[in-house]
Image (cartoon, coloured by chain):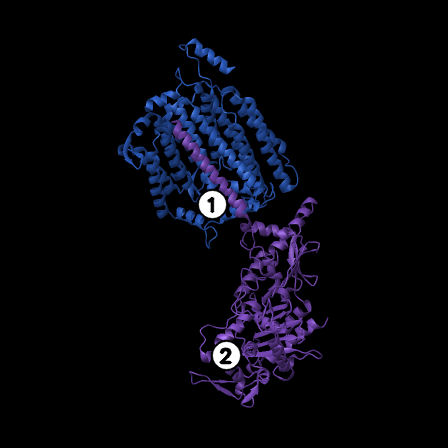
Amino acid sequence: MSRTGRTTATKRAPGAGPLMEFVHRRRRGAELYLLVLSLVVGIGAYAAVGLGVNGQVPADLIKHGAWLAALVVAAHVTIRYKAEYADPVVLPIVSALNGLGLAMIHRIDLAPTGHPVGSNFAASQLVWMTLGVLGFITVLAGLRDHRRLQSFTYTAGLAAIVLLLLPLLPGIGKTVNGARIWIHLGPLSFQPGEIAKVLLVIAFAGYLVLHRDALALAGRRVLFVDLPRGRDLGPILAMWLVSLGILVFQNDLGSSLMFFGLFLVMLYVSTERPGWLVVGGVLFAVGAYAGYLTTAHVQARVQGWLDPFGKDSPSYQLVQAMYGMAWGGLTGRGLGQGSPQTTPISWSDFILPSLGEELGLTGVIAIILLYALLVERGLRTALICRDNFGKLVAAGLATVFALQVFVVVGGVTRLIPLTGLTTPFLSQGGSSLVANWVIVALLLRVSDAARRPPPEFSDQPADMDSTQVVMMR
Amino acid sequence: MNRPIRNLAIACLIMFLALMINATYLQYWQAGSLTSLTKHPDNVRVADAAFDEPRGAILVDGRAIAQSTKSSDRYKFLRTYPEGAEYADITGYFTRTLGLGGIESTQNSVLTGDDPSLFVNKVIDLLGNAAPQGGNVSLTINPKAQKAAFDGLRALGPRVQGAVVAIEPATGRILAMVSSPSFSPNQLAGHDFTTAKSNYDRLLADPLGPLNNRAIEETLPPGSTFKLITAAAALSHGYTPNSMVMGGSSLKLPLTTKYLTNENHNSCGPPKITLTRALDVSCNVAFGSIGLKLGADVLANQAAAFGFGRNDYFHDLDDQLTRLSASEFGTNVDQPGAALSAIGQLNVRATPLQMAMVAAGIANNGEVMQPYLVDEIRSSDLDVIKQIPSKVLTAHAISAAVARELTQMMVSVVQQGTATTAQIPGVQVAGKTGTAQSAPSRPPYAWFVSFAPAESAQVAVAVLIQDANVDRNQISGSGLAAPIAKAVMEAVLKK
C-alpha cells in the first residue's frame, strides 16, 4: 500500500468506508451534566477545606462557588455557540481539576505555616483562571478553523524561541528555585516556557506536515528498523541542541525533557517511522548522560532519587512529599486535616502529594485517571481528525499533557528523578494555567472540526446524500 | 498517521499505569514503613499526630511509669514519666524528632493502638464514634525490687557506672533492670524541641553513656562469678561438692613460665581442698586447675548452655541505639587460656542480664528461661488482650542434681564464704562474688550474682559495679555489689 494512498483515505473522499460515515452527536447536554458534577467536586472540596481547617464553611464559599460556576458556564456557552461538536468530556475534566486545585491551594493558604506570610494564592489563582477562561473563549471565538494556524508555522516557531530565550536576558530574567525560567515585567511575572509549549506544537505541526514525506524516506536498515537518512537529521539535531541549551543555561530539566519528547513524538506520528524514535532515544541518552556529568543540578536530582533517605540527601522536599502521601494512605487524612504544608512548595510543583495526603490513594488515582482521560480524548481527536495538520496539533497537545503529567507526578512520587514542572490545572501558577486553558481551547477547536459532520459535496451522487440523512437522524 | 497515534495512546496508557502503580506502592505498600516512627523518626506528620493522640501507658503493677497527660500548648498531649530516671532504661523515651527508645519503641504499635491485636477495639472505637485510644503495656517489673536496685546504685553516687538485673527463675520474668548513670526521659519528651534536642545531644556526648543500657549492652569480664559455670561443668563431669581439688597459692600454667595466683596473692589454705571450700573462698588456683583438666571446650559448651554466644533471646528493648550484646567465652582458647577462662578472665565477657540468667538457671533446677519484660498487652480499658507466655531457653543447662549440689555450694558461699554481706535473716541465700581484673590502669569490676530462697527461688539477681569512684582496695563483689543484691532480694521476698 502506498503512503499517499493511506493519507488520502483519511480525507473525506467519495467511496470511503462506512466507518467514515459515522456522525458524532453534539452531546452538549451531557457536557453540562458532567460540568455540574465537576462543580460539585470543586466547590465541595472548597467547603470541605474550610470545615477541615476551621470547623466552618468558608465565609466566601458562595462568592468562590459562583465565580467558579460562572467561568465554567461561560466556557460551556462558548462551546455551544462556537464549537458545538467539540468533545463533551474535556471541559468537565478540566473544570474538576481546576476546582480541586483551587481548593487545595486555599487549604495551604489556611495552614499556619509553610507558605509566604499573608499569601492568598487561591484568590490570585482564581484571577488567573479567569484570564485562562478568557483566553479559552478568545481562541474558540476568534479562531474559526484550526488550519489557519498552519500559516503561522514559522512565526510561532520564532516566537517560541524568543520566549524561551527571554529569561536569559539580564534585567527581566530571574532565577527561582535554581531554575532561570521566569521573567519579570514590572509587577507581572510569568514563565514564558508555558506559552512556548503551545507555540511549539503549532510550529512543529506546521513544519512536519509539509516535510513529513521527505523525513519519512528510509535510510540504512538496522535490526528491522529503518533509520532516517543522515541528511534529514538537521531538525532533530537543532531541537536537541535547544533542549540541551534549556538544560544547561536555564537549569530546567523538566522543560528540556518535555520539549524534546514532544518533538520526537510528533516526528514519529507524522512520518510513521519508528527509526526516529531510535535516533531520538540515542540523542536523549547522550544528552541526559552529558547533562548528568556536567551539571551539579542534575546530579543532585539523580542522587536524591536513588537514595532520598541517605545522609546529606538533597531531597528533603521529596522525602516530605513521600511521608505525606504515605500518611494519607488509602483514603487520606481528609481535606484540611493533614499537614501538606510541611512539604516546601506544597501549593505548586508538589500539589499532587498534598492532594495525596488529604484525599489518599483514592484521590490520587482519580486525578491520574482524569489526566489519562484528557490525554485519551486528545488522541481520539487526533485519530478522527480529517486533516493532517489537525491530527498533529491534537496529538501534540495531548502529548504535552501526557509528558508534563508523567514528568511531574512521576517526579514527586519518586518514579523518576524530580524535575520542576507544574501539574496542569492543579498547581498554583498563572502562566501555566492560562497556557493550559488555551491548549484545551485549541484541542476543542480541532475536536469540533473532527466531529462535525462533513460539508455536503454538491458533486456527490444523490444516494450518498440520502444515506447520510438517515445516519444523522 | 493513525497507527503511530494508536501506538502513542498505548505508550500514554503505560505511562499512566506506571504512575498509578507507583502511587499505590507509595501509599499502600510502603506507607506502613514510611509512617513508622521507629523506622522514619523524622516524619514529623506522624510525630505531630502522635502528640495529638492519647498514647497508651506503660504500667508496672498497675501504676503508670509512662503516660500521656493532657496538655494545653500546641499539642494536645504530653508524654510524662512519673518515675523519671528509675525506669528510664526500660521505658525509653518518646520524642518528636529524636526517635523512640526502649519499650516506647518496641511496643509503639500497641501504645498507638495500631497493633493488630487491638484491631477489634479500634473498630469498636470507630463504630462508637469515640476517639481512638492506644493500648497499654504491662511490664513484669516488681516496683519494690526496681526501687531497691535503683536506690542501691544511686547510693554509690549519681555517676556510678553499674547495672542490676533481677529475674524470676521459674519464668524468666525480669523483676528489676537498672543501668547507671541514667537519664530523665521527661527531658526528651517535652514540647520545647530545641531544649529536647540539646538534652539529647548532651546525653549522646556524655562519655559515661547514660543512654546505654549496661544491663544488656555492656559485656565485661565476669571474673569469679564465672566460677559458677566452671563448677557446673565440673559437677557434670564427675566432680562432687566434696571432691578434693588443688589449693595452695599458685598454679603453674602449662606452656608458659607464668603462675596463676589468687586475689591479692592469698593462699586458699591447704594444698588440697574440697570443691565447696574452693567456691567459698573463690580459689583461683582450684578453678584454674579444674579448667585445665576439663579443657576449654567443656567450659565453652557449659557457658553456651546458659546463653553465652547468643544475642537473640531478648528483644523487648531493641531500639535505634540499644541491642542485647552476646556474652562470649572466647574462641581458640589454648591450654593456659582454659585456666584463665575458668576464672572469668582472658576473653570471657558477659552482660549483667546473662549472669542473672546463670543464677536463675541454677535456681530453676538447670532450666534456663528466656528473660522477658513485656507481661501483658491491655486495651485502653485495661482489659487483658494478650498475655505473654514464658519460654524455655535451655531445658537442661545442667541436670537437676547438679543444680541442687551447686545451690548448696552457693549457700555455703553466703553462709561462710566471701558473700556473707548478702545474708538475709530467716532466708537461705545462694550467691557468688566476683572481682574482675581489667587493665592494670583501671579499677576492677565488682560483680555479685545470687538467688533466694535457695530451695525454691523467687528471685535471681546480678549486680555489676563497673566504676564507683572508690578506692581500689575497697572494690569487691561482697563490699559493693552484694548489699544491693540483698536489698533487691529482700524487696521481692517481703510481700
Mark 1 surroundings within 10 Å by alpha-carbon count, few (fewer than 14), some (14 through 19), many (20 or more): many
Image chain in purple: B
* Residue shown at 41% from the left, 21% from the top: A386
| Residue marked by disc 2 | B294
Looking at this view, is A58 or A423 the one in front?
A423
* Image quadrant occupied by the N terminus of chain B: top left
Residue mark closest to the camera, 2 vs 1: 2
- Residue lying furthest front in this view? B238
Element under label 1? loop
Amino acid type assigned to the residue bearing label 2 in the image: Leu
Q: What residue is rendered at 32% in x and 37% in y?
A: A279
Question: In the picture shown, does residue A205 fall above or below A355?
Answer: above
Q: Quadrant of residue B333?
A: bottom left
Q: CA distance from mark 2 to mark 1?
A: 62 Å
Above or below, A139 relative to A191 = above
Q: Nearer the viewer, residue A426 or A454?
A: A454
The residue carrying pointer 2 sits among few (fewer than 14), some (14 to 19) or many (20 or more) residues within 10 Å by Cα, namely some
Q: Position of residue B106 (x, y in %)?
A: 59, 58
Chain A shade in the render: blue
- Which three-letter amino acid code belongs to the residue tagged 1? Arg
Closer-to-camera residue (B133/A400): B133
List x then y, in percent, for residue B392. Answer: 60, 65
Against A345, is A82 above or below? above
Find residue A108 and report its image quarter: top right
Q: Which quadrant of the figure has residue A223?
A: top left
Q: Is residue B158 visible?
A: no
* On-image quarter of the C terminus of chain B: bottom right
| Residue that carries the numbered disc 1 in the rendered image | A414
| Residue B477 placement (x, y as % from top left) | 59, 79
